[in-house]
């Protein structure tokens, strides 16, 4: 099947970036969120990113508006998905929410259409089981920021077909990304490994070994990571961090238990860069 139109569900941090990358590579995009205001916010993020790429000579001069013109906003999921050739879901990390959305997509999308999820760690098999097409449900795990990060982790559910895997590998390549194939185990490779690193950094903080700033500095300059753990947590979003840590704890036990300080920040509405405050305060600059 020839893929021309991609529906992207959720215009947040990831959905807006995924929509941008798809549009940059010539696809028509239907971008869905709950309100037009949220879609506008996502488009604004994409415009800023495209302007950076344009300034750096990574995309042709003057192409920002052409790319954005390929993205159409929708608040009606069914209307956005009914003529899409591929769907990529990027709504919050909640299994029941995702299953409900996949049930609705299954009713409205043509039978041959692949339904991909950008979940950070949830079961692809469980999401697939909410549909009558589990062979066409797959994990397509992008990384933040999608326009810059080079990998898509392809997660193969128990009933995902080899044809679906091959199509998503091909599309990922057309989107300029490298891929790895991963079995459907909670947290896949990347989220599980990243969580172990970040949670150990939290323990170091809780034990009073060093400050947030010095742990970040140590990890960046001493270990050559691009971001320290607290900077990265704020960048990814603390709500996502908490959902992921809770689900990994359910799967693997206490070693992934979310630290209290993370829970309290989320309860206070401090979600990191996207809300203005997290481990750091972004309202001062
Ligand atoms: C502590 C809490 C405990 C919590 C426990 C629970 C843990 C749970 C863990 C799992 C979480 C889920 C994970 C998720 O599913 C998967 C992820 O996404 S993981 C995150 C992956 N991302 C990263 O690791 C990012 C690391 N950072 C970087 O790579 C870089 O910092 C950066 C973001 C690329 C920015 O680079 P910098 O050099 O820092 O800054 P610059 O501003 O100079 O940018 C460099 C270069 O990139 C261009 N650029 C940056 N951002 C964008 C953008 N959005 N769009 C376009 N271009 C961009 C910029 O223009 C520069 O280009 P150049 O000038 O070099 O041409
Ligand atoms: N943040 C990251 O770094 C990152 C990286 C990789 C994967 N992920 C995963 O991607 C998904 C989205 O994460 P995010 O960081 O973009 O979250 P986000 O909170 O920034 O965005 C989610 C968006 O989905 C919208 N939404 C909620 N319900 C919806 C519905 N029924 N229909 C359409 N839109 C709806 C919200 O309004 C919001 O704009 C999660 O599963 C997350 O685990 C996140």
Image: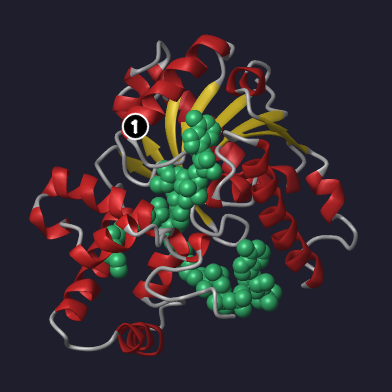
In the rendered image, the vertical position of residue 2 relative to residue 62, given as above or below: above
Tell me the quadrant of the picture where the N terminus can be found: top right
Residue drawn at (42%, 58%), measured in percent from left and top?
A: 237
Tell me the quadrant of the picture where the C terminus can be found: bottom right
Would residue 37 appear left or right of 64 to someone viewing this image?
Answer: left
Number of numbered discs on residues: 1
Picture coordinates of residue 73, whole percent (x, y): 71, 34
Where residue 126 sits, quadrant-wise, is top left
Residue drawn at (25%, 41%), measured in percent from left and top?
A: 185
In the rendered image, the vertical position of residue 159 relative to residue 150, given as above or below: above
Where residue 211 sits, quadrant-wise, is bottom left
* Nearer to the camera, 268 or 19: 268
Where residue 157 sits, quadrant-wise, is top left
| Crowd around label 1: few <14 · some 14–19 · many ≥20 (10 Å) | many
In the rendered image, the vertical position of residue 34 relative to residue 85, given as above or below: below
Picture coordinates of residue 244, whole percent (x, y): 29, 50
Picture coordinates of residue 33, whole percent (x, y): 59, 35
Residue drawn at (41%, 19%), measured in percent from left and top?
A: 135
* Nearer to the camera, 106 or 125: 106
Would residue 156 appear left or right of 50 to someone viewing this image?
Answer: left
Direction front: furthest residue? 268
Residue drawn at (15%, 43%), measured in percent from left and top?
A: 251
In the rendered image, the vertical position of residue 154 relative to residue 136, given as above or below: below
Q: Secondary structure at mark 1?
A: helix
Would residue 110 appear left or right of 184 to someone viewing this image?
Answer: right
- The residue labelled by disc 1 is 124
């Amino acid at each position: 099947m020839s893929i021309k139109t991609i529906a992207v569900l959720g215009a947040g941090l990831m959905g807006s970036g995924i929509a941008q990358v798809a549009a940059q590579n010539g696809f028509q995009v239907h971008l869905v969120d709950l309100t037009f205001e949220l879609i506008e916010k996502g488009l604004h993020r994409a415009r800023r990113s495209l302007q950076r790429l344009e300034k750096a000579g990574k995309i042709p001069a003057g192409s920002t508006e052409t790319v954005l013109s390929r993205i159409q906003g929708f608040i009606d999921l069914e209307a956005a998905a009914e003529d899409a050739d591929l769907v990529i879901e990027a709504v919050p990390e909640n299994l029941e929410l995702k299953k409900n959305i996949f049930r609705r997509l299954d009713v409205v999308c043509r039978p041959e259409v692949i339904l991909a999820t950008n979940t950070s760690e949830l079961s692809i098999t469980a999401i697939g089981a909410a549909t009558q097409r589990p062979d066409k449900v797959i994990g397509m795990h992008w990384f933040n920021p999608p326009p810059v990060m080079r990998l898509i982790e392809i997660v193969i559910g128990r009933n995902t077909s080899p044809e679906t895997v091959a199509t998503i590998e091909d599309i990922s390549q057309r989107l300029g990304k490298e891929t790895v194939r991963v079995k459907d185990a909670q947290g896949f490779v990347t989220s599980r490994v990243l969580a172990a690193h970040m949670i150990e950094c939290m323990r170091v903080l809780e034990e009073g070994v060093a400050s947030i700033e010095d742990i970040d500095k140590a990890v960046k300059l001493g270990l050559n990571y691009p971001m320290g753990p607290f900077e990265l947590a704020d960048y990814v979003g603390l709500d996502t961090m908490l959902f992921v840590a809770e689900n990994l704890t359910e799967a693997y036990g206490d070693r992934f238990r979310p630290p209290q300080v993370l829970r309290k920040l989320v309860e206070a509405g401090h979600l990191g860069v996207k809300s203005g405050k997290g481990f750091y305060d972004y309202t001062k600059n």
